[in-house]
Amino acid sequence: MPMAPSGYADGFARDSLPDETDWPDFRFDIPSVQYPKRLNAAAELLDGALAKGWGDRVSVYSAERTLTYSELNAEANQLAHVLLDDLGLVSGERVLIHGPNAIDMMVAWYGVLKAGGIAVMTMPLLREPEITTIVQKARIRLALCAAPLKEAVEKSMAQGSGLERIALMGESEDVASLMAGKSDAFQACDTAADDIALLAFTSGTTGEPKACAHFHRSVLAMADTFGAMLDPQEGDIYAGTPPFAFTFGLGAFVVFPARAGFPVALPPKPGFEALCETIQRFGVTHTFTAPTGYRAMIALKDAYDLSSLRGGVSAGEHLPEATWRAWNDATGIGLVDGIGATEMIHIFISATGRDIRPGATGKAIPGYEARVIGEDGKAVPDGKIGKLAVRGPTGCLYLADDRQKTYVKNGWNITGDLYRRDPDGYFWYVSRADDLIVASGYNIAGPEVEQALLMHDAVAECAVVGQACDERGTIVAAHVVLKQPLLAGAEMAKELQDFVKLTIAPYKYPRVIHFTDVLPKTQTGKIQRFRLRT
């Protein structure tokens, strides 16, 4: 489908998209994702909320302040004026947004899109080299930065990254003073539905991050597919841990609530204690975090009132059945598992309510197709393991990156995950393609061994990888965090090995167990297994 005429003056991002012969096959098979050719996602969400009569509804709770949808829209409009009038934004320009999950960062994201910019949100803990990589890849001139986190961005500018202006966000900072004198009315930039709205950088579980371009229509599609599947109701309040820079968090905390007209509650700082405090304070109904987060909250549940919770979504990593059952036993809540990808913007396989099968990821959600394929690219029979392929209204568009040809083949997005599908259409996770361990001629999926270890009462977290061995070539190695670290030692290692042998096929047991205090993770909670491989 040919792209509509752009509403942007700066064409760098669109010109840096892959050749259209390497694009995924975008599909718009359901009415909810059939959008008009001219579309600004921020205006559709915020102005749309007001048009639906939701202006007086709370849009966001935080420890510092609470905003209604009318107030959030007014601040986004004022910032859009600042971007154009004072900061010289040219439509189509990329804008770095660097800060924690906070109201100012929500305002920044909406303001940038309304003004015709392309939002590039970054994880708050990034350091100067990581910021510089992003700035140079996306050719960013302007940054909106939370004042307490300015050091890394200022260092990047000093290093000659290409940044020319840093505008600080905060109650007493320059952006706030500029906004104070601006009108709270603004006509959003006339963008095409397939103009780029954001560049989302992959989280680095496998090394060099990639810039994933997503259109204005794609922003809405994640709300109108998976977001709608969650069946949002008046009275819902979402909260969780993934940063806005992680599209899992952007969808859950910025896009989904606005699309359905209910609030998000933002924890004042990272961490699961802060999340539990937020649930208790604001009566949060639905949580969004990684499997490790749910395991951590089980240990905290007696210290906080979590009785307002009615649901939860797990993503970022596969949700082990042991974790699903432990959370269900502790709270009575059946977690919604889902697989998504930065390349796809959000979740595309999941199941909710009575359709949940613990241990299975779920089925392709409405609007998406998924299949398990072999090396020849053809679908394999149910029950056979192969690579996951998916297509739908969103898809992978790497910005000027040769890895596009690896991720997209014959119109399908190849996610790098190994799956099997059962006869009922449920997809069961096996491992990442690079997490499959070949030991003594056996194919062993690391996550299956992890699932077995997590069933042992002593294990808090674990990661299983292949380890080089002169005698066997590769052996299964488990890196284990114990609930009681003082139990680490040869006796516990043998106990865990014997436990795994009794739980799954004995040949899959970890021949080596490394006890550790912490596993390496990205800022979104994904375990960086590549750092554990030797």
Image: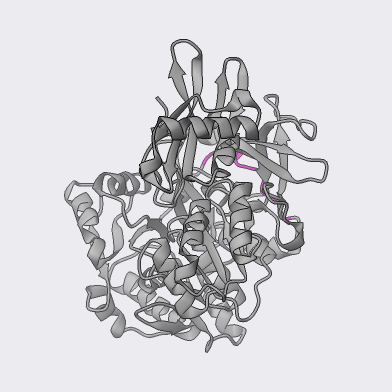
Q: Which residue is drawn at 58% across and 33% down?
A: 500
Q: What segment carries the magenta color? A: 18-28
State whether residue 296 is above or below residue 22. below
What main secondary structure does the magenta stretch of the protein show? loop
Q: Residue furthest front?
A: 491
At 23% from the left and 65% from the top, the residue drawn is 148
Q: Can residue 309 be seen in this view?
A: yes
Instruction: Please tell me which residue lies in front, 51 or 432.
Output: 432
Assess whether residue 24 is covered by the magenta stretch.
yes
Residue furthest to the left: 158
Of the pair 354 and 150, the residue shown nearer to us:
354
**Which residue is at a point 46% across and 64% down the rendered structure image?**
300
Q: Position of residue 479 (x, y in %)?
A: 44, 35
Q: Is residue 241 magenta?
A: no
Image x and y of residue 421, in percent: 75, 39
Judging depth in this view, the residue of 491 and 188 nearest the camera is: 491
Which corner quadrant of the image does residue 28 belong to? bottom right
Q: Which residue is drawn at 49% across and 29% down?
A: 494
**Which quarter of the image is occupied by the C terminus?**
top left
Could you tell me if residue 44 is visible in this image? no
What is the x, y in percent for residue 235? 60, 81
Q: Is residue 46 left or right of residue 485?
A: right
